């Protein structure tokens, strides 16, 4: 098979097909002469021949005894032969194919390893890219959340400002409506007051003509006329107070303070609240007189309410006009109600903030500050004195000539 020949042969044949060739016969003769030699081999003309001796063993005697063999005799041999040159060529081909196979396997392994490395590298790059994209997305989401919160805060702040402005407009419209209503009342009262005066004069002369004491009648008539005049003047004061100014003008802050006081005089007197006004000198301001009066009215009214709510003995409201070191006019409105609580000092001018609970709207001091800062280019602050609160209006002293510069 594949160039190899294998044969069992002997000089004493049982099967004639196993007859030895010339070389095999010579080797069998050699084994018979040299019983101790186990095998023989040679290469002749690229033919490799190998033969191993077959000796008779004790268990072989049952078959080979009749052939005249005894234990230890050489009864034959196993012959193997093949073309050495052809086999060498075949082995070289096998070795060459083996090397090519190994090289192929090595290259395949290297290719697989390189592919895995490239795959891992690309996967790592993709994972890094995805990670970076995720981080960028998270940053954008955070940025969007921040912008959304800022927008929400700005919208909330703008809505708050809009509400404050609307409330201020409502308050101003209420004041305008109140002024118009008082004007209508004044118009309606003019004729009845005149008629009452005429009736009183008629009563006076009728009484005198009937012998009633003239001095008594004159005194009573004077008292009645005084009350009628007071009613008429009060209506004029209210109407003028709430009438908006058309243009800026020079005005006396002391006079405007007195106008505000006259509006509240009856309620102050009713509560036995003493009102004192002091001025270091005569001052003039350029602006809207009625707005200044309204601010003072709000501050006096606020002090009055605190004095009443805290049931202060010997309640006092003082107003001081003076010039500070920066040549500004200062209008200080003080009370002896104990002052503003520390936790409320920073909130007292905020809209809707009030300590009056049910009675307060929380808009009066806010409007006062808005008027002073936005319409009069000044400031309104609050401090606590030894005995109470001290609201200070600070206004620049400038005249009409300064306004035109």
Image (cartoon, rainbow, N blue to C red):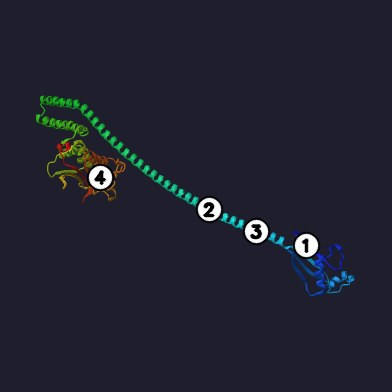
Of marks 1 and 2, which one's residue comes earlier in the chain?
Answer: 1
Residue named by callout 3: 96
Q: CA distance from mark 4 to mark 3?
A: 116 Å
Residue named by callout 1: 5
Residue beneath the point at 85% across and 62% down: 17
Residue named by callout 4: 306
Q: Nearer the viewer, residue 288 or 29?
A: 29
Q: CA distance from mark 4 to mark 1?
A: 136 Å
Q: CA distance from mark 3 to mark 1?
A: 26 Å
Residue named by callout 2: 118
Residue 207, position in %: x, y?
A: 12, 26
Secondary-structure class at tag 3: helix
Q: Quadrant of residue 96?
A: bottom right
Of marks 3 and 2, which one's residue comes earlier in the chain?
Answer: 3
Residue beneath the point at 59% across and 56% down: 107
Of marks 4 and 2, which one's residue comes earlier in the chain?
Answer: 2
Q: CA distance from mark 1 to mark 2?
A: 55 Å
């Amino acid at each position: 098979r594949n160039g190899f020949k294998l044969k069992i042969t002997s000089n004493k044949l049982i099967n004639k097909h196993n007859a030895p060739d010339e070389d095999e016969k010579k080797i069998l003769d050699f084994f018979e002469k040299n019983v101790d030699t186990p095998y023989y081999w040679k290469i002749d003309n690229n033919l490799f021949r190998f033969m191993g001796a077959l000796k008779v063993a004790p268990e072989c005697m049952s078959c080979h005894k009749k052939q005249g063999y005894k234990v230890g005799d050489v009864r034959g041999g196993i012959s193997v032969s093949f073309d050495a040159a052809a086999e060498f060529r075949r082995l070289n081909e096998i070795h060459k194919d083996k090397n090519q196979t190994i090289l192929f396997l090595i290259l395949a392994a290297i290719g697989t390893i390189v592919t895995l490395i490239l795959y891992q590298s690309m996967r790592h790059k993709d994972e890094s890219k995805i990670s970076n994209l995720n981080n960028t997305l998270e940053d954008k989401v955070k940025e969007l959340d921040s912008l959304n919160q800022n927008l929400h805060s700005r919208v909330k702040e703008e809505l708050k400002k809009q509400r404050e402005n609307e409330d201020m407009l409502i308050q101003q419209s209420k004041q305008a409506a109140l002024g118009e209503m008082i004007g209508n009342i004044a118009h309606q009262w003019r004729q009845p007051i005149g008629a009452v005066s005429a009736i009183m004069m008629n009563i006076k002369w009728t009484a005198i003509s009937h012998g009633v004491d003239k001095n008594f009648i004159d005194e009573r008539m004077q008292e009645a006329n005084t009350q009628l005049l007071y009613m008429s003047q009060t209506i004029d004061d209210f109407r003028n107070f709430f009438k908006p100014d058309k243009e800026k003008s020079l005005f006396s802050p002391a006079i405007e303070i007195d106008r505000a006081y006259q509006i509240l005089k009856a309620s102050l007197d009713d509560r036995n609240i003493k009102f004192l006004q002091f001025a270091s000198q005569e001052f003039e301001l350029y602006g809207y007189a009625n707005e200044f009066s309204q601010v003072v009215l709000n501050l006096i009214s606020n002090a009055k309410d605190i004095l009443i709510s805290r049931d202060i003995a010997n309640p006092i409201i003082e107003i001081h006009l003076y010039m500070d070191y920066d040549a500004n006019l200062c209008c200080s409105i003080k009370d002896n109600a104990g002052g503003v609580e520390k936790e409320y000092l920073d909130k007292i001018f905020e809209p809707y903030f009030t300590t009056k609970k049910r009675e307060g709207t929380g808009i009066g001091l806010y409007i006062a500050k808005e008027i002073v800062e936005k319409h009069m280019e000044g400031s309104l602050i609050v401090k606590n004195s030894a005995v109470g609160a001290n609201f200070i209006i600070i206004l620049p002293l400038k005249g009409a000539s300064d306004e035109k510069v």
